[in-house]
Amino acid sequence: MNNTANTGCPGPRNLITDVDGLMVGNASDDAVKTGVTAVLCTEPATAAVQVLGGAPGTRETDLLEPHNTVEAVDAIVLSGGSAFGLDAASGAQAALVEMGRGFAVGDHRIPIVPAAILFDMLNGGDKNWGHNPPYRELGHAALSDAAQTFALGSVGAGAGATTANLKGGLGSASLVLQPHGLTVGALVAANPVGVATVGETPHFWAAPFELDGEFGGLGLPNPLPADATDLRIKFRDQTSNAPQNTTIAVIATDAKLTKSECKRLAIAAHDGFARAIWPSHTAVDGDLVFALATGKREIEGGLDTFVDLCAAASSTMARAVARGVYAATPAAGDILPAWSGLR
């Protein structure tokens, strides 16, 4: 088996949109400290999902299982707002209908938009929204804003994200594999019950996978601090068993994959959570990864190349998690500092 799994460099944007056929849009509400991120497939893309957290919140995920009928999706939505945020997919669907997109049923178009949400209700924002939660409109705005470049950090689905010790955020990264030329991209709203940094230091657990100083270039602390593996758990002093967290993500490639292969790619990308977050996949996280394959490139090299692709999915996801926390910015009313305040 070859050893090229992580040989490569970031794409030109170092974003998931380096994968040909994808665009991303964000919409945020600064007063509520929440938001929505939408991934628009310029053409329907093969999709799958893997849920490993114990407290997920989802929409239209069953149809992504390999044994079910629907093969491709029009968009993926990641949202804050806990269960209220599931409305964001309806707004994204409305925007897609306006674009003439969706599965044709007679004279009607039904856009396929799976979605996942995270809990950002206790982050200092004003959640007294009355009769109309903002998420449907945020979903419409995020999909309508989709482009090849987009902001990271305290925006979109990462606008109100937190970790146990710092603000979380929206992160993204890409890798162009060599010699295959395939591209892998990750997008993540990092809102875990645990931490992305090592002990009390500003160093990221994802440091071994960092490319070009993309999240500070600090590497791992040497030696590791005595408190490196101490558990720092969000809200432990308040409601230790409450599902108030969740890291939700999309892993994507331009390779031509089946639904089953997309499922395996999503499983591999979860390893990136484990490399970047301590702890991950807990009973109070709803950790979830969607996988998208735009099918622009054939895979050459068979199983060896697919193993490389899965390894790249893991490392790229770890980088995206760290970039989301690294890019977070401070704002009035925050209950936790941004990473930039550690330096």
Image (cartoon, rainbow, N blue to C red):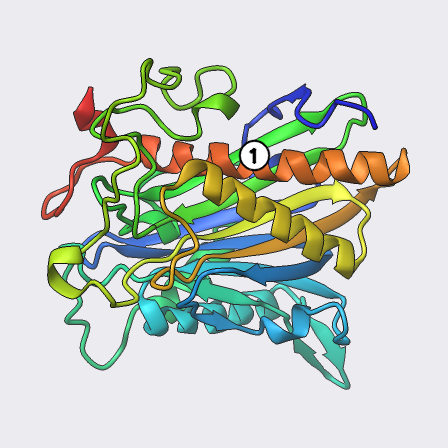
Task: Please name the residue shown 57% across and 33% down the image.
Answer: 315
Q: Is residue 272 above or below residue 81?
A: above
In which quadrant of the rendered image does the C terminus lie?
Answer: top left
Instruction: Give the camera-side residue of 110 and 161.
Output: 161
**How many neighbours does mark 1 have within 10 angstroms: few (below 14), some (14-19), or many (20 or more)?**
many
In this rendering, would 105 be left or right of 330? Answer: right
Instruction: Give the camera-side residue of 329 and 9.
Output: 9
Task: Please name the residue shown 19% across and 25% down the image.
Answer: 342
Instruction: Give the camera-side residue of 207 and 226.
Output: 226
In this rendering, would 289 be left or right of 263? Answer: left
- The residue positioned farthest toward the bottom in the image shown: 106
Q: Is residue 32 visible?
A: yes
The image shows residue 296 at horizontal and vertical percentages of 80, 43
Task: Please name the residue shown 42% across and 72% down the image.
Answer: 86
- Give the number of marks: 1
Q: Secondary structure at mark 1?
A: helix
- Residue pointed to by mark 1: 316
In which quadrant of the rendered image does the N terminus lie?
Answer: top right
Q: Is residue 150 visible?
A: no
Instruction: Give the camera-side residue of 25 and 210.
Output: 210
The image shows residue 327 at horizontal and vertical percentages of 33, 32
The image shows residue 289 at horizontal and vertical percentages of 55, 55
In this rendering, would 114 be left or right of 226? Answer: right
* Residue 316 image-quadrant placement: top right
Q: Amino acid at mark 1?
A: Thr
Q: Is residue 204 above or below residue 307?
A: above
The image shows residue 258 at horizontal and vertical percentages of 81, 56
